[in-house]
Image (cartoon, grey):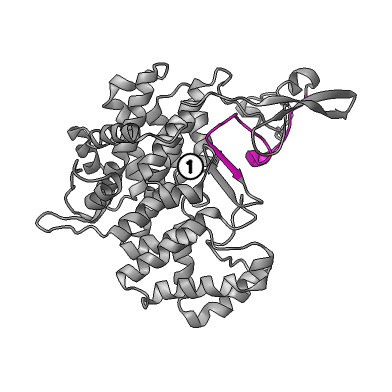
Amino acid sequence: MSEKKSSKENNDSAVLSGDGFSINLPLLKGSLGPDVIDIRSLYKDTGKFTFDSGFTSTASCESQITFIDGDEGVLLHRGYSIEELAENGDYLEVCYLLLNSELPSKSELESFKKSITYHTMIHDQMTDFFKGFRRAAHPMAVMCGVVGALSAFYHDSLDIDDPQHRLISAHRLVAKMPTISAMAYKFSVGQPFIYPSNKLDYVSNFLHMMFSVPGEHFEQNQILTKAMSRIFILHADHEQNASTSTVRLAGSSGANPFACIAAGIASLWGPAHGGANEAVLKMLNQIGSVKNIKEYIDKAKDKNDPFRLMGFGHRVYKNYDPRATALKESAHEVLNSLGVENEPFLELALKLEEIALNDSYFQDRKLFPNVDFYSGIILKAMGFPSSMFTVLFALARTVGWIAHWTEMIEDPNQKIGRPRQLYTGSMRRKYSDISDR
């Protein structure tokens, strides 16, 4: 484990004044990124709150896990660039890094992989949960319910103040998410569940549970396995996004880790967060044909037209999404491996990518294809239905959620989350009897 570092108070301060008050607010300095104005004493000293809808200018916590520089297109996990991790690491190696602060030695990685492998099974009674859902239930609804129910089966790791319990829960969640995800899919298509195999690595095991059927031999495609591992790595964590913040907020109350991860899944389910790659496919379906691309490019440029190119640009990145750079190569490898270069839907996506990358309108506005654009193409080519896209996102992001939850629990300064508000409702009113209304 690396030595814990904390933010340091800068010698400078920010001065805030108005309405009869003036206060010096300390500046905190992190290891990377902008200085932060410490407003924790603001209400006590001035009787004022800050207003920051969406918390886009507010640091809610101190963290050592992930750093993003959106202007420069930088994404670091524990100091390692996402490009290097996606190119050289495997998913469980990145999981170990996120959970333990350092890359594992060979023996540490072998021990970690063994622990994950032998936690992949779920309690047999949990398979009955799936029968309680309608066959047409969205896989995210199933996943949210089943993950939340884990706390009803694994009572031996619910003491959040016990480091060993936290470790066991972390390993269980990373291990069981592929099993739960594959079962949600199999249930939705009416196929029998495929149980995990301890002979397979993490990603191969997931693809085996997803796509194999009894009575037939399932052949692993190494290019697809590599692409799936890369997708998992690129989605493992992304700083204080909506779902991660939800996990931290739920955890701040002392809720058990399974409940907190279920809360994160619910947040991720929203189309503005985890459903972007599914939206890419809907957009491609709307465009319909290569011959219609120019028309839709023109619509995207028209500020009065509601149409937008999904999968281009990013709220945080004002430069090229570094995850997209890593995934673009995999997209073309997968398409070539499967021989689907001439499939109209995917041909449309590649042509749209080519045109947008060479259009000055998109270049000037930094509207480059993002990770959702390429992941949607890859997952469709591999045979995943669009309803499973967000499930895969949740599977990959689970380790990031757990890392943040653990960091929060171990932070001696953490408090239960309690945002304030700017009240704009009615003034105080007198209650009147119903006969007088």
The dominant secondary structure in magenta is loop
Locate residue 104, reporting x and y percent. 39, 34
Residue 277 picture location, percent across and down: 46, 58
- Outermost residue, right side: 20
Q: In the depicted view, which residue is nearer to us: 220 or 317?
A: 220
Residue 152 sits in quarter: top left
Does residue 288 sit above or below 193 in this rendering? Answer: below
Label 1 sits on a secondary structure element that is loop
Residue 176 pos. (x, y %): 29, 37
Check the image and report above or below for 400 versus 271. above
Label 1: how many residues lie within 10 Å, few (<14), some (14-19) or many (20+)? many
Residue 61 within the segment the image draws in magenta: yes
Considering only vertical position in the picture, is 315 above or below 125?
Answer: below
Magenta range: 48-68
Q: Is residue 390 visible?
A: no
Tell me if residue 293 can be seen. yes
Quadrant of the drawing holding the C terminus: top right
Q: Position of residue 114 (x, y in %)?
A: 26, 34
**Which residue type carries mark 1?**
Asp
Residue wearing tag 1: 237
Residue at 55% from the left image edge and 22% from the top image edge:
416
Q: Residue furthest bottom?
A: 291
Looking at the image, residue 427 sits to the left or right of residue 187; the answer is right
> Considering depth in this image, is 191 or 338 the residue closer to the camera?
338
Q: Check the image and name the residue furthest to the front.
A: 106
Residue depicted at 32% across the width and 27% down the height: 151
159 or 317, which is in the foreground? Answer: 317
Tell which of 155 and 104 is nearer to you.
Answer: 104
Q: Does 192 appear in magenta?
A: no
Count all numbered tags in the image, as a single digit.
1
Which residue sits furthest left? 215
Q: On the picture, is 237 further left or further right than 15?
A: left
